[in-house]
Amino acid sequence: MILWVVLMMGCEDKESTVVDSGSVVEDTEERTTGNGSERDRDTEAVGAGDDTQDTGVCDPIGLQSDSFMECMVEVKSKFMPEYRTSTLQFLKVSYRCGITTGNELVCWENGKVTFREAGYVDVAFGAGYQCAITTGGHVECWGGEPFGLQYHPEEAGYVAVASGSYHSCALSEDGRVDCWGVESGDLDYGQVGDVPEDVVFVEVSAGSRHNCALDECGRIHCWGDGDSGQTEAPAGEFVQVESAGEYSCGVRTDGEVVCWGLVLKPGGSGEYFSQPECSFVEIGLGTYHACGIDIEGQLSCWRFNQEGEANPPDGEFVEVGGGSHSTCAINSEDYLVCWGDNDNGQTTPP
């Protein structure tokens, strides 16, 4: 679900930001040597069209496409998943936590359901911890003490939160992004300390060790770990950006999805993952798979499909989110439908 916070008309002519990762890369190949072997890395953004950067004053960003393209993507799985539907109605989902239509925060695992009383607007599930935004604009986090996740901002005024493996970021109502978590040692890739300055943001997302955010003119800025090209954001105007694992995807104004980072199939074949050819209005990423909602509310998924996580159900949906090998989506009646890996009960919502 896209949350627009600031829509301002005055934007300077500037390119997408890549912090400590060089400039925006059109098509590069990097060869590194380690332990006697070589590795190729192709960081071309998959699905990218014309990357010409607009100049001058921007219009408020919004989906401009009224066309519909037939979705075409091949997904393979050893079995069809079981689809499980919640009895509660939801506004937002993040892995195995969600915000109900009554603004309660609900999490579930191995048959155990925990409730936090009404008063939440957003939640983000990290690696063994969770962070949420209250209706009063405060950040709350629990779990993750070894990585400093308890040192979140104390002031009010936040509207959204995103969590990676060892860090989280929150978006303020005036368009500022603040991050916290690991800031030293082997796990520090600048995902906390290298937030772009003097930029007004409308959305923020977090991968394992990197972040990408959308500014008021629809440009994407990424920072943190860029070893797989996940901070090399394409130029152009976007309406949404999502991050997970070692990759990110964005939705352009015409509904095209563009992905960058770890976008090559494993095995060294040099082949890209197939993507649906759809006009999307919403995307959600898991660690290894991606799903999107087209302009008719239909779901399509791609990339890995180990546990059936990329075999979506029929129906009309408004939001989708993914875990490692599981997916949950909110349908048009606000009920949560989950499928894929259920080893920890993550696809059995209350």
Image: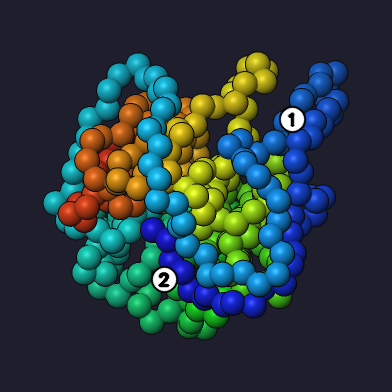
- Percent x, y for residue 42? 72, 31
- Percent x, y for residue 288? 50, 34
Indicate the colouring scheme: rainbow
Q: Is residue 149 visible?
A: no
Q: Give whichever of 111, 170 is nearer the camera.
A: 170
Q: Would you place residue 192 above or below residue 10 in this image?
A: above
> In the picture provided, is 220 more to the left or to the right than 276?
right
Q: Quadrant of the N terminus?
A: bottom left
- In the rendered image, which residue does mark 2 sit on? 133
Which three-letter amino acid code belongs to the residue tagged 2? Ile
Q: Would you place residue 55 above or below residue 129 in this image?
A: below
Mark closer to the chain start, 2 or 1: 1
- Percent x, y for residue 196? 71, 66
Residue at the far left in the pictured view: 87
How packed mark 2 is, by other alpha carbons closer than 10 Å (few <14, some 14-19, many 20 or more), is many
Residue at the far front in the pictured view: 67
Q: Give whichever of 252, 314 is nearer the camera.
A: 252
- In the rendered image, which residue does mark 1 sit on? 41
> In the picture provided, is 81 more to the left or to the right than 77?
left
Please state which of the two labelled residues, at mark 2 or mark 1, is closer to the viewer: 1
How packed mark 1 is, by other alpha carbons closer than 10 Å (few <14, some 14-19, many 20 or more), is some
Label 1 sits on a secondary structure element that is strand
- Percent x, y for residue 138? 44, 78
Q: Residue at x 70, y 36 (%)?
A: 44
Calculate the distance from the C-alpha at mark 2 to the C-alpha at mark 1. Answer: 37 Å
Which three-letter amino acid code belongs to the residue tagged 1? Arg
> In the picture provided, is 209 more to the left or to the right than 34?
left
Q: Is residue 101 visible?
A: yes
Q: Residue at x 77, y 24 (%)?
A: 39
Q: Residue at x 47, y 48 (%)?
A: 255
